[in-house]
Image (spheres, helix red, strand yellow):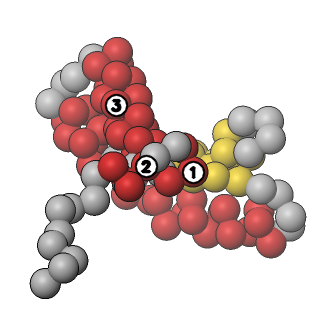
């Protein structure tokens, strides 16, 4: 499975540009051009764990599960999603 970087139009979800990881600078240049024209885009690029899983021949289902687990973990630390990191702050003795 080839690792690709995609530039996606936010409203429609349409992939406007796609390239290999080695050419990812082209995706960022393209995204900058689209934003200069007023088109809202996002860049989807494989994470390090996803790249490793692909290199180790993980199935698409396993990679999708990994991506969901990563997204869920990130959301759990988002302070706009409830308690966020207020519940995982390190214990410190502030009375010293």
Q: Residue at x 41, y 35 (%)?
A: 72
Picture coordinates of residue 68, whole percent (x, y) = 40, 29
Residue 20 in view here = no
Picture coordinates of residue 75, whole percent (x, y) = 46, 42
Q: Which residue is drawn at 67% across and 45% down?
A: 8
Q: Residue at x 67, y 39 (%)?
A: 15
Asked if the residues shown at circle 2 and circle 1 are in contact, with their CB atoms under 8 angstroms apart, the answer is yes
Quarter of the image where one finds residue 85: bottom left
Label 2, residues with CA under 10 Å away: few <14, some 14-19, many ≥20: some
In the rendered structure, the answer to whether residue 52 lies left or right of residue 20 reads left
Point out which mark residue 84 bears. 2
Label 1: state its secondary structure. helix
In the rendered structure, the answer to whether residue 54 lies left or right of residue 25 reads left
Disc 3/disc 2 C-alpha distance (Å): 16 Å
Picture coordinates of residue 82, whole percent (x, y) = 52, 43
Q: Which residue is drawn at 38% across and 24% down?
A: 64
Point out which mark residue 80 bears. 1
N-term-proximal mark, 3 vs 2: 3
Disc 2/disc 1 C-alpha distance (Å): 7 Å
Classify 75 as above or below 41. Answer: above
Q: Nearer the viewer, residue 73 or 11?
A: 73
Point out which mark residue 61 bears. none
Residue marked by disc 3: 69
Q: Which of 76 and 12 is in front in this view?
A: 76
Classify 32 as above or below 58. Answer: below
Label 1, residues with CA under 10 Å away: few <14, some 14-19, many ≥20: few
Furthest residue toward bottom: 96
Quarter of the image where one finds residue 1: top left
Asked if the residues shown at circle 1 and circle 3 are in contact, with their CB atoms under 8 angstroms apart, the answer is no
Disc 1/disc 3 C-alpha distance (Å): 19 Å
Quadrant occupied by the C terminus: bottom left
């Amino acid at each position: 499975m080839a690792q690709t970087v995609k530039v996606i139009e936010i409203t429609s979800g349409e992939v406007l540009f796609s390239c290999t990881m080695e050419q990812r600078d082209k995706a960022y240049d393209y995204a900058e051009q689209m934003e200069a024209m007023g088109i809202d885009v996002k860049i989807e690029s494989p994470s390090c764990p996803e790249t490793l899983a692909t290199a180790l021949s993980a199935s698409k289902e396993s990679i999708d599960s990994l991506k969901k687990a990563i997204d869920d973990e990130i959301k759990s630390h988002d302070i706009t999603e409830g308690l966020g990191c207020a519940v995982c702050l390190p214990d410190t003795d502030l009375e010293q």
